[in-house]
Structure formats: C-alpha cells, structure tokens
Amino acid sequence: MRNKHRRPGRHRHLAYGTAALLAVAGLAATTALVAPTSAGATPDAATGSSAGSTTKVTLITGDTVGVTGGSRVIGVDRGKGRAKVPYSVQSLGGHTYVIPDDAAPLVASGRLDRRLFDVTQLVADGYDDSHRRTLPLIVSYRGSARTADDAKRALLSADVEVKRQLPSLHGESVTADKPDAVSVWAALTRPTQEAVTTERGIDRVWLDGKVEARPSQDEDPDPTQGTAQIHAPDAWKAGYDGKGVKIAVLDSGLDATHPDLKGSIAGSKDFTGENSTDDRLGHGTHVASTLVGSGARSGGKYKGVAPGAKLLVGRVLNGEGDGGESGIIAGMQWAVKQGAKVISMSLGGDDTPGVDPMEQAANDLSASSGALFVMAAGNEGPKPGTIDSPGAASAALTVAAVDSQDKLADFSSRGPDTSHELKPDISAPGVDIIAAKATHGSLGDPAGPGYVRMSGTSMATPHVSAAAAILAQEHPDWTGQRIKAALMASTVAMNGSDSPYERGTGRVDLARAIRQTVIADTPSISFGQQLWPHNDDQPVTKTLTYRNTGTEPVTLDLSLAGDAPAGMFTVSPSRVTVPAGGTATAAVTADTRVGTEDGAYGATITASAQGANGESVRTTLGAVREAESYDLTLKGIGRDGKPNAPHRLDVIGLDNGKQWFFADDGSSQASASKTKIRVPRGRYLISAQLTPDTDEPVEVTQLVAPRLNVNRTTTVTLDARKAKPFKVTAPDPRARLSSGAVVIGARGAKPEYDYADWLGLGDNDVYSRYFLGQVGPSAPAGDFIAQAGGVWQRGTTGDVYDLVTTRRGSFFTGLTRTYSARGLAKVVTSIGSNAKGSLAAPTAYWSTPGWPALSAGPAGGTGSFRPVPAASVVHHVYTGDGLRWDLGPGVTSDSISSTFKATAPRRYSPGRTYRETYNTGVFGPLTTDSKTVGDPGAVRAGEAYAVCVPMLSDGAGHANYDAGTTRFHLTSGSRTIADIPANPCGAPLAGLLPQKATYRLAISTSQSAGSVTVGGRASAVWTFTSSPTADNKVERLPLSVVRFTPKLSLTSTAKAGTELTVPIRLQGPAAKRGAVKSLVVKVSYDGGRTWKSTTVHTAKDGKRHLTLTSPARPTTVGLKATLVDRDGNTVTETLPSAYRTVR
C-alpha cells in the first residue's frame, strides 16, 4: 500500500511488519510438524528448495548467498568487482534478508523491492539457483520516452530478456541471467558521489513474485447455495442474468469440457508459459462455475450467479496454484483489452508497504477503462490487518467471506490495510460452496458427480463479480466504480459483526441491488489515523453525497450503528431528500476525542427510504485512534565530532515487531544527521552504522542501543566518538582474520518479534578499522546478546582458530582480547575428495543454545580454500559460553558442490583433541530418529508429512544437503501424491490419504559426471504402510536406511584384491533389535550393470557386516541392499559407485 513514512534528506526509510510467509498455513520448517489446512501438494514445497537443504541464491547485485535450512545464511560470495562492498544479514518475523550496502538506500526509498533480498522467500518460491538460472523482475520507467529507451537499451546490453510489456505500469517484465547479475545491477543503477541510485529512466524494480490461489477448508454446519443466499433468483426473474457482459476470470484456467461451462467461453489465454488454459488445479473451474455455470450437470441445482454472462479465461496460476505477478498483470491488461467489464481475481499474496505492481495495475486500469476489479480479501483471519495484495488496491472491490447464516468466516482476512484505510468492501458466501469440479483438478471435497465443495474468500469473490455483471447488464452506461458503489450501498447487515473492517458494508444482496435507485457516491469514508494523544484531536468532517438515479424523489432517514463509542461518529442532518436525477448531501464527522480505547473503529450509516419500496443505502465509516506513541529523534555524530547521518540505521520494535529501516541516500549530510520517526510506546533496539565522508579505506562504527524504553518524546544521540576499536589476537599472533561477523540478538514480546542482525567483518584489513560502542542502558542478560568472532587463519593452509566473544545484556564498547590456547579444543579434521581438482574451505559456525533467532545467519566464518584430500586441517575451537559448533566444510570442484553438516552442532571441551572425517565414502542415504522438520528423517501429522533423506551423506554420518540433482516421487497405488525435482528436506507437504494406505517413495540423487570419481549416484525405493495420526500428533514414518561404513582412504578407496570388512548400520525403525525380517545385499564390480548376492554376517550382539574380496584389478564396487522389516515395510537402496579399489 501507500508508503506514508518516506522522509526527505539523506535517509530513505521504510517501515515493515512481521508477517511470515510459509509454504503451507500452520507449518513451520524449523519446528515440529503441524498439519496443514488444505489437501494436495504444497505449491511452494513443490518448487522451492527444501528447508533442510543447502542452496545458493544469486541476488540482483550479483552477490551469491549460501542458504541452508531454507533460511539460514551460511556465507556470501561477492560478485565480480564487489569484494569491498559490505553487506548485512537481518532476521525478523521468520524471514532472513541479505542486503548489500549499495542496495540499502534504494530498498529504504522503495525504489528497489525488498523481496529481492528476502532469501527465505526466494528459496521457498523456487527462485534459488538450483531451481532457476534467471531472476524474474518487473521494471518500471520514468522520464521522457528517450530517457526510458536509453535505460531499456542498457538492460538489453546486459543480456536481460524482455518477457512481457506492462503498459499499465509503464514497464516490462524481464528476466536476468544470474551469471550476468553484476552487469544487470550496473545497468539498473549508477553511482553518485556518495551513494548508488537508479539509472536515469529507471523508476522502480520489483521482484516478479509469486501469487497463490486462496481456498480455505472451513466447513459450514448449515450449508446453502450462495446463489439463493444473495437472492440471485430475484435478478433472474427480473430478466437480469449477466447477458451481454464479459467477465474475466484470472485463475488456474478452466475445464471447458464440464457441462456447466459449455458455451460460456468468449476467449481464453494462458499467461503461465505452459500454453494451455486447462485447469489442472480445480480452483479456476470452481470459481468460473459460481460465476456463469448453467448447472446442467445437476439439473440446475448448482447454477451460477450470472449464467447469461460470457467468460474470458485468463490462466495466470499453474497446476500447483501459483503464478508470477507479471503474468497476472498481463492477464489484467488482456482482460481489459478484450472488453471485460468485470475482472474476477480469487488470488493473492501478503501485502507489503507501498503500492505493489498488481495494486498499481488495478488502480490504473480501473481509471483508464472503467472496468471493475473484484478481488479476494484473503484467508488470514481472524487477525486484523491481514488484507491480501492485490485486494488492498483502493480501486478494487474487495470481498470477505460469510457462511450460510451471514456470519463472518473465521478465516476471512480483516482490515485495516497498511495505510489504515477501510478494507474489505463487501461480503459474500464463501463457506462450503458447491460448484463444478475440473476433470484434472485436485482441490475440493466431493459433493456429487461433477462437483466439489470449497471454502475461502476465493469462493466469495465470484458471487460479487457475477453480481457486478448483472448490474452492468442493467446499467450498461455505469462505470466499474459506480457498480462498486451500488453493490456496497445495497448490502444487508450481517450476524455478529459490527465492524466494517471485517465485513465491509455487509453481505451482497442482488434483490436490493437491481432495484436500488439511490447510492452513495463514496460507499465508504475513511478518516485515517489520528495521532495520540487524543484529548486535543480536532473533529474531521467529510461530505457524504447521495445520488438518485430514479424518476421520483426519495427521502432518506439516516441512522448510525457500529462498534465505535457513541459520539465518535455523527451524521447531520438525520433526514435528506434526494431529488430525481439529483443529489443530496450529509455531513459526516469523526471525533476521535470520544472513547478511551485506541485502535480501529467503524460504523455504518444506514439511509432508509420512506415509503413502500424499502430502499436502504449503507455506507461505512472508519477511523483509527493511534495507540500511545511518541516522536523518536535519532542524531548522528561522526568520529570527527561533526553531524553525520548513519550509513544504515535500524529501529526494531521489541513489543510490536515493526522495523524502521533507513539508509544513506547520498544527499546533504547536515539535513539528515537527524532522523525523526513516530513509534508506539514500548521497548526498542537501535542499531546504527556510521562511516565518514572520506575515500577508502573506510572506517565503520557500529553503535547499538540494546534496550530503549520509549515512554515520552525521546532523542537518542548516536555519537561515534564513544566507540572503541575491535582487536582480537589468536594464540598464534601470526593468524589473521579470514572472515567473521558481529552478531546481535534481542528477544521480543513474542517469538515472532525476536530480532537478529549479522554484519560480516570481511578480512583482517576491514575489521582493523572497525569500532564498536553501546548507546544507553543495557538490557536484562536474558533479553539481549552480542557476539563477535570468526575464523582466524595462518597463511592459506595453516591452522584455523575459531574464536568468539559473547556479551549478554550489553553490546561491546570496543573489544580487545588475546585468546589463550588453554581455553580451546583441538579438532583435527580430515577432508576427503570424490572428484578431481576438489577444493575445500574449512568453516566454523557457532550456535548459541536458547537463542534460535541467531541460527538464521552466518554466525561464523570461512577459511581459505585448499586442495583436498587433506589429512589434517587443524581447528582450534573456543569452548566457552556454552557454544556449539559445526565444522562441516564446503567442498567444490568443476562438477560438484557439497556442504557437509553434522546432524547436530557439537560442544567441545577445552584442552581435548578430537578427530573428524568429512567427504569420504560410502556415500548414501541418511536418516535419524528426530521428529523435527528439517532434520534427516520422515514424519507425518494427520495428512501432512515431511521427508528429509540426504542421499549422498558421507560415511562418517555427516548430512550432505547440497548434492546435485534429486528427484522425489511419492505414490499410493495409481495416485501421485508428490513429484518434486528436489529433495524436500524440511518442506512440509500435504496429501497423504485420510485412511490407512500403502505408499511407494522413490528418491534418486546424482552429481554431474565431470570429475566425480566415486559416490556420485544413489537411489532408494521405500514401500510402507501408514495411517493418519490422531489429533495431528507427530509420528515417524517407517522409513529405514542401510548404511555401509568400511574404513576407506580419503579418496574413498580400498586396496584391490584384498579382503575388506564392510560394517552395516541400520537407521530408522529397522534399527531396533528384532525389527528386521530380512536383509539382502548384492555387490557389483562393473558400475552397477550386474549384481551378485553376498552374505550378510550377523554377530551375537546383532551387529552386521559384509566381508568382500574385490578383484585384483582396480574397479568400482557397487552395493545394493533390500531390507524388509517385521511390519512389511521395505527399502531397496542402490549405490552403483560405493567405493573404488586401487593397487
């Protein structure tokens, strides 16, 4: 929505909320499994990288971010020529952002979409590098045609491909090849003397994000058909069924073979790139049937609201229920061009500050064409402030959902919107709506042959869209906004809801709408937000105009009702007469001095006509009494004592989860050394980075206020002179910092308000010019944490020192520390190689028990790459402060990239020596007994499930999440439940059957052949029986694996022609004593072309092993295991290249 917080001067500012976007409602990737609310495969899970996997995300700047667990940043590789550009990592509201410094001012000003740096959502939406080689963007232009053309040519020269023209935005949708992202960034931006700004001709750059269909699964205890509930039959009797009107339905397509929809299609076009408008989801067909269905399959029982209207079918959502924003905008433009009077859009995504591309398109196309966009409010209720985009567009007619008793559906999203304006606008039936089933659709509960039952604001929206088409037939000269006003004016009151922020003016009523002659020119009046305190608020008066389109004067009696205190809203006079063909006005006043509670208040004016016609006109009013809030002023002073605007500044609301983000935009220093914002009373964290206006080398001063209590007008001085240097010395003074981070974390009033921030320290030269300082008082020790550390290394192949200093409750005011070897553990790591030319970088990431928010960022560092195999990479690990460590290295070659992770971080004891081996065979599947989503294992809750089996984990039991190309295929009988081109580690999925069933799961992983010498392929097929769990209790699925753990060299080899003992270790349910019915192992010496059974030896203690004697000639040894447990569950693993033999 509109950004009300932009400030002039050197800083640009954007305020953010804390809404977290999850693939399935109710499922969190890093917590225990919770059942989803809808059946079928989860769209994001089918496309995005799995939450437990490691992947890379290339940013628009050309920098590449390593991400594991779907959200945790484990490193940033700078793009070419960007080695000196700092970056920060932030975690808030379940999302992790990586924002390079040169992009920060553009993000803060709103010229650059912040979602381009939200690595959590980029991974979830499948925009990571393992799923897309391109970055989809929407670019809008400004200035003269020549200036815009120059900008377009610059983009084309950077190999940007134009996908669609978007004239409603004065822009284009484009894709940028990720390997060329640095060039694209250079074409989009230009450096000025003090900052980076957009290139001349470039206005804004957005991510071409994903939007989803919005069904829900609520049930109506007393269902009835929505057509009858909104009195559509009354319109039919009067001769209005939408005839001659085109309705565009922008959705998942349509099943044109359904009897209810035959003859209703006036045109169709695909905008998903799949060259088909067939509905593979079932959502679009259901919506279309509610719009115009004939009811032929049901003998007229399930007839749509406007069966005489014609459909324009724009397929903007794919078979998994999501689509790109540019495709949706292109569909909107197409619909208008094809003559649609009404455009029905039962889709949406989370709204963000500012007017996003879809909202802008809706507003502009409404104004230019006279069409009406009818949009779903969303299914994120009952929490207030949850209206979806593009339903938040001011011109849209935004629809909430009610049940058969006109009671607001609990799932229906509530207002106000992000600008404190009134939304939704109107309500309609949206619970247990029965409509046509698509032949190939997967959504909905059966409701008889050819029909399914669905719930959601998606289902309410077509009721209103079709009602609009009927009014368009009755009044062909009316604009879309006039139709919107008439529908909102003629609604009926609802049961149990007095707030227009929940239901708009009321439930749509076609019987009233078609005979209504009086409407309000402004169907809702918003007074916005009035600032605290309210004892000095001035009453605000606005004019309400009634318009009579009839031939007789109408006298209206005006009354007020709602949830506002008596006297907050008044209307005068109480009676008006509206002449035929004329207007009459009333004065509506909001006085927010009235009342004692703060928040959003609404009321409805009902203007009732005298006489027998029973006309009434409903108009909603809204006003927001700002909660207790104060001005917070932040003054920056540089190390030279002169006014200095912070290079970056974050203000985090620990009691409200809000973030105010500022960045230096390169304008006058003096005008921006003071920043004033308005914040609610409460506790805040402030983090600021100040840099002088000098050429390199640049000094960086980080100032942090761990706990600021704002209970009055407050000024905070950020004085860089109070900061002191940061200097850490390893036990070996020759060691230099390779990379590291300064980390801060703060606990909010709710877990979703927790905040964490990481600032990468870079190399030794950078951190030597780094200053730290605390501002103001400390916080309680349990509410704030600061850490500074990383990897110090001697030379490029010397010992590695993994060092961290932790403060609880306070930030550092300088840090000077020399570590003693006595407090360190020695960890000797051996790193193997399964590909020629491999390199490995020793890494060390620490985790802090009790601080889950800190797990999202790169708390640690990476040493220099060195050739492997390497027998002794020595880590000296700091053991204090309860820290746990993961020393899994990153291994790369020209054909592979692997990241090995311990199944759980490890705590080391000082003075002890440990030995660990990584990246040696036998590489194969790995599971654990964990019930936590994201850990290796398999669990279900109800009909939801999560499976994570890293298929090429090393012989020591380190999970390898980044291991090439994977296919995941789950079936039950002839039914495909999931077919995913990725290993969905930690991604909650839906679709298991509601009854006991047998399943078949096949997972295969392969690394590029290239230089891989061993262990590059693995596959497994499981068959298992499972039943839904009671009360969504999390239970393990009976998936077992067979692991082979022989002693091999660091190149995964054994001596040819000799006897080798191959221990067998079972994981999963079969690991229990007596759980195995049979285990058959076969061996291959020809790369898996032929197999021969071998004996499985079982000792008295139950341990199993093979004794293999390979041929005298060097060869590749393959292993295949088939296990059957006592319950009949099976697994067959195939490892064609388990290890090699050499002379």
Image (tube, grey):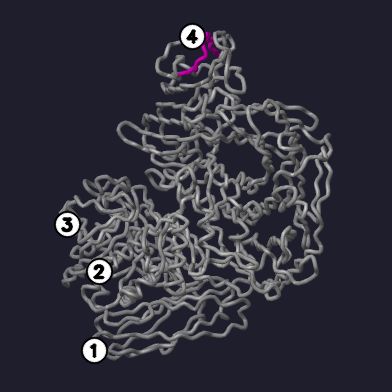
Q: Identify the mark nearer the N-term, 2 or 1.
A: 2
Is any atom of residue 886 visible in this view? no
Q: Position of residue 1108 (x, y in %)?
A: 53, 10
Q: Which residue is mark 4?
A: 1095
Q: Does 556 sit above or below residue 380?
A: below
- Between discs 4 and 2, the one toward the N terminus: 2
Crowd tier of the residue under label 1, counting other residues whose Cα lies within 10 Å: few below 14, some 14–19, many 20 or above: few
Q: CA distance from mark 1 to mark 4?
A: 99 Å
Residue range in magenta is: 1102-1120
Tag 4–tag 2 contact (CB < 8 Å):
no
Secondary structure of residue under mark 2: loop
Q: CA distance from mark 2 to mark 1?
A: 33 Å
For marks 1 and 4, give the one nearer the viewer. 4
Q: What's the distance in space between the residues labelled 3 and 1, CA to CA?
A: 38 Å
Instruction: Name the amino acid, label 1.
Output: Glu
Q: Which residue is mark 2?
A: 339
Q: Amino acid at mark 3?
A: Gly
| 130 drawn magenta | no
Dot 3 or dot 4: first in sequence order is 3
601 versus 908 height, above or below: below
Tag in front: 2 or 1: 2
Question: Contact, CB < 8 Å: mark 3 with mark 2?
Answer: no
On residue 300, which mark appears?
Answer: 3
